[in-house]
Amino acid sequence: MKQLVKKVPIISTFIHNTNYQDACDRIIYWVKNNTSCYIVAANVHVVMMGYWDRKYREILNNSQLVTPDGMPLVWGMRLLGIKNQTRVYGPDLMIAWCDRAAKMGIPIYLYGGKISTLEKLQTNLKQKFPNLIIAGTHSPPFRPLTEKEKAEDRERIHNSRAKVVFVGLGCPKQEQWMARQKDKLQAVMIGVGAAFSFHSGEVEQAPRWMMKIGCEWLYRFSREPKRLWQRYLINNPAFVVLFVCQLLKMNLPYTLKQSSICIDQEKK
């Protein structure tokens, strides 16, 4: 049985101490045990949405695994004592799992995105992993689904016999969708955000050097300012303030204790 993975709170969301190999090992364990669960790749935007929205925060904290998708969360975890923490980026986790799934013959399902995106994505994944079993794909409408459509989507995935479902609906829609399917859909669901657009070739990823220094947000913002301005110009500064407050609260008892010791020594 897989040991429980350590998790630390970043503001109001618990992020797990994991890496690509560990995450893939856990997915295999859940697949073999027919566990219905979901994985969240969390960045600053996800954490801040959890801070503003209690129901969404509960969805995040009820997930089987929350990976540090963004470098600010990696740095935060290191400051909180997880010195060896590395980034577990949603699009890269998708590739890591496809590699593992291709070797083990575990079928996957692609849910979300446009039909054209899914077609390009399938082609690119099959070129990269010829043995990968893509059991099915579906592009749901962007409007809210009816109860009948929700049931049809679950039946479609069940009939495909896929064991892992990649969900590319964007935040917070994909996390909300996965939470609703828990215990209804016998599969491991992984929310991968913009990975469908990246791996289909429709959207260019930020250079790796920008990712390493935590400036990926600047690259994406420069390309989609109208859509992303609120996410980065409001949430990012708010995250910094709230996380600094968290660190100060955690260190305050120690600081007061040390001050008390110094005062007592002076009196002596």
Image (cartoon, grey):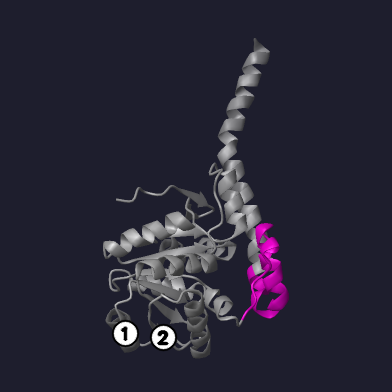
Question: Toward the viewer: 264 or 145?
Answer: 145
Kindly identify which residue carries mark 1: 156
Q: Quadrant of residue 175?
A: bottom left
x then y, percent, for residue 156: 31, 84
* SS for dot 2: strand
x then y, percent, for residue 17: 48, 50
In this rendering, is residue 202 above or below 267? below
Kindly identify which residue carries mark 2: 138
User: Left or right of 3: which side holds 83?
Assistant: right
Whether residue 59 can be seen here: yes
* SS for dot 1: helix
User: Left or right of 28: which side holds 19?
Assistant: right
x then y, percent, for residue 179: 37, 69
Question: Toward the viewer: 67 or 110?
Answer: 110
Tag 2–tag 1 contact (CB < 8 Å): yes
Q: Quadrant of residue 262?
A: top right
Whether residue 55 can be seen here: no
Question: Toward the viewer: 224 or 2?
Answer: 2
The residue type indicated by label 1 comes to Arg
Give the extent of the magenta segment.
Answer: 203-231
